[in-house]
């Protein structure tokens, strides 16, 4: 029987492994996580991607695809059929891993199967605004950073992470913002995130006109500024 809140995570390298470590550390106890590892090195072109499918997969409600090769994303329709998943999350932290054509193909196939899919770009931009209850429940916990900051004499004395980036950088940054002056907090937060380090692509992204690592930094900076406006 499928657990009420179960998620299958597809991992191919350190990018995905680090996210899994953070998810397992911070998931509520009523979530179960099953990880499927794929080879870290794959040829540029794979004639039959389905040969990469795990021989045995467990039923789950959600699939989180953290592959670092387009072939992993192309497996999602087949994996949905095998797992009976109702929702799919495909972060795009590097457009080489999920190119626009692959995103379009996978999205259309999943829609045809009646499955909701989201493609947050970058992953830390994700918000709870899909039409799938469990995807949104995930996104209330992991996604665009949301903070509660407490000030004393313009110094940050406490930071509560209400929603953290999936990679764990928000909590890393929050710990380092203590005793920082509010005037310096947003800029220092971006610098701290880079040293975590952020694993989003450094290449210029066509959609944004900037690198995704910079976009991720802007998102965190914006989140800190929003929290400072509400700070007491």
Image (cartoon, rainbow, N blue to C red):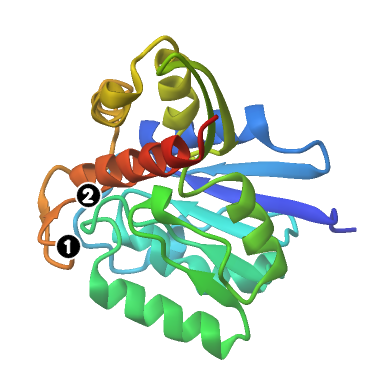
* Residue 43 sits above or below residue 154 on the image: below
Is residue 134 toward the left or the right of residue 19 in the image? right
Report the Cα–Cα distance between label 2 and label 1: 8 Å
The reply to whether residue 55 is visible in this rendering is no
Tell me if I can see residue 29 in this picture. Answer: yes
Provide residue 57's location: percent of width, then percent of height: 67, 55
> Which label is found at residue 208?
1
Horizontal and vertical percent for residue 171?
50, 25
Between residue 142 and residue 3, name the one nearer to us.
142
Q: What residue is rendered at 29% in x and 36% in y?
A: 199
Quadrant for residue 194, please give it: top left
Q: Tell me the residue that label 2 is attached to.
A: 212
Cβ–Cβ under 8 Å for marks 2 and 1? yes
Judging depth in this view, the residue of 166 and 56 nearest the camera is 166
Residue furthest out toward the top: 179
Instruction: Name the image quarter holding the C terminus.
Output: top right
Provide the secondary structure element on which disc 2 rests: helix
> Position of 9 compared to 61: left or right?
left
Q: Circle 1 — which element?
A: loop
| Residue drawn where x is 52% and y is 36% of the image | 147
């Amino acid at each position: 029987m499928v657990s009420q809140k179960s998620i299958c995570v597809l991992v191919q390298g350190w990018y995905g492994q680090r996210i899994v470590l953070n998810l397992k550390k911070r998931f509520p106890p009523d979530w179960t996580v099953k990880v499927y590892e794929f080879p870290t090195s794959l040829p540029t072109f794979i004639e039959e991607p389905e040969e990469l499918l795990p021989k045995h997969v467990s039923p789950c409600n959600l699939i989180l695809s953290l592959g670092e090769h387009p072939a992993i994303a192309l497996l999602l329709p087949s994996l949905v059929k095998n797992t009976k998943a109702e929702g799919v999350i495909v972060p795009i932290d590097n457009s080489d891993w999920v190119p626009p054509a692959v995103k379009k193909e996978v999205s259309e196939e999943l829609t045809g199967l009646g499955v909701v899919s989201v493609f947050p770009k970058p992953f830390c931009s994700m918000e709870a605004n899909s039409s799938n209850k469990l995807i949104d429940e995930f996104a209330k916990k992991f996604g665009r950073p949301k903070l509660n900051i407490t000030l004393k004499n313009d110094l940050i004395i406490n930071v509560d992470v209400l929603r953290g980036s999936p990679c764990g950088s928000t909590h890393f940054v929050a710990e380092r913002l203590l005793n920082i002056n509010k005037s310096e907090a947003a800029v220092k937060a971006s610098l701290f995130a880079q040293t975590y380090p952020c694993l989003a692509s450094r290449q210029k992204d066509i959609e944004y006109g900037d690198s995704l690592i910079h976009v991720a930094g802007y998102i965190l900076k914006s989140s800190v500024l929003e929290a400072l406006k509400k700070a007491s």
